[in-house]
Amino acid sequence: MRILVIDLLGGLGDLIMVLPSVHALAEAHPAAELTVLTHAAGAPLLARDPAVAAVRTAEKHDERAAVEQALADLVPDLTVTTTRFDGIGDLVDADAAARGTRAVANLWRRPPADEKVGERYQRLLAADGVIADRVRPPRLVLGDDERAWGRNALVRAMRLCWRVTPGSPHPRSRDTPTVLVPDAGMAVKRWPAHRWAALAGTLPGPVLSVGPVDGAATLPPTDLRGLAALFAAVGEAGGVVVGPDTGPVRLAAAVGVRTVALFGPTAASRYGLEEGTNLQGLPDCPHRMPTAITEQVCWWDARCPLASEPACLLDLSVDGVRERVVAGG
């Protein structure tokens, strides 16, 4: 049996949200050969996953052609796609009908505002009878060698952090690092830079960051799997990763780190992490559209109709975020 899973929504976080469905499909069909078609940026996430036999990649703006080629090459017995733009969902349905095979080409189906995306995928696949009726969180597979590298890299980074912030008035523990992820792929999701600096200056323990933050030591540059290994080491040390609704924060959660995620324009009820703490700014924003976020007035250019900066992110105070980080969620 051949299974093809298509996820071409574009973001690292989108692929992480579909990981539980990939694992559920492999578990439900243990003798099948499962292939994932995704964009090249996210492909390393699947590199050492025993559930995935092969990974195919698509170029941006040429996704439909990549789907057509994958269907022709693999002739899958079951095709599952999270992606419907450019007629991809219809293409998958038509291919299955022509071959007499099976497809699940619509994993949206009028989603409710309070059901998390990755969990909805699993419930719909279970309702269609292709996986077991059990919802699971995302998990990224790391090798023992990668985890060892992550531990060593974290120790080096924490030593640097202690040199960068000598004489801190806070009681510090070398075993409980905090990692800040200040950036996001879209401006509308970014907490103001001065708040990250203020947060870094009030946290106990060594404070590190992915990218520059005043008052924090920057983690060493690495690739996607290296970052996952670093995050795994942070989790083993009892630490926490803090950041906006962005792929690296989802990556941290997928390797078992406690997370505090900051949600502004996106609804935490729908896009929140399955595990960890999801902080929603301005919960009653009248312009938020949980099931149609790309149609929000602020989405593409971060122009908020309520304030000069996104009011939902301004609603998340430094003290409020710090409290959740220090209190353990």
Image (spheres, rainbow, N blue to C red):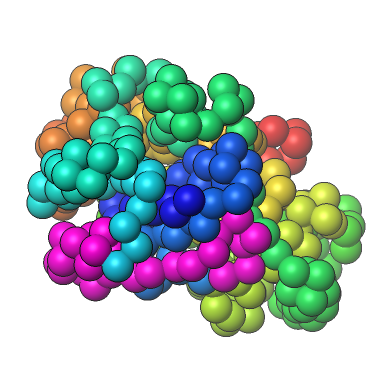
Residue 93 visible? The answer is no
Q: Position of residue 123 (x, y in %)?
A: 46, 24
Near-viewer residue (251 or 37)? 37
Q: How many marks?
A: 0
Q: Give the quadrant of residue 218.
A: bottom right
Query: Is residue 64 on the magenta stretch?
Result: yes
Front position in the image: 159 or 263:
263
Q: Give yes or no for residue 177 being in the magenta stretch.
A: no
Q: Residue at point 88% right, 53% down?
A: 171
Asked whether, in this view, residue 54 is left or right of residue 161, the answer is left
Q: Position of residue 261 (x, y in %)?
A: 53, 42
Residue 82 in the image: above or below residue 210: above
Quarter of the picture containing the C terminus is: top right
As drawn, 119 above or below 92: above
In the drawing, does residue 265 fall left or right of residue 32?
A: left
- Residue 296's quadrant in the figure? top left
Q: Residue at x 71, y 48 (%)?
A: 256
Q: Residue at x 60, y 50 (%)?
A: 31
| For residue 202, side relative to residue 248 (left or right) | right
For the point 49% across and 56% down, which residue is it?
A: 34
The picture quadrant where one finds residue 324 is top right
Query: Considering depth in this image, is 290 or 72 the residue closer to the camera?
Result: 72
* Near-viewer residue (322 or 271): 271
Is residue 76 at all visible to an observer of this figure? yes
Rendering coords of residue 14 (x, y %): 39, 49
Q: Position of residue 36 (x, y in %)?
A: 42, 59
> Which residues, given as a range, are shown in magenta?
47-72
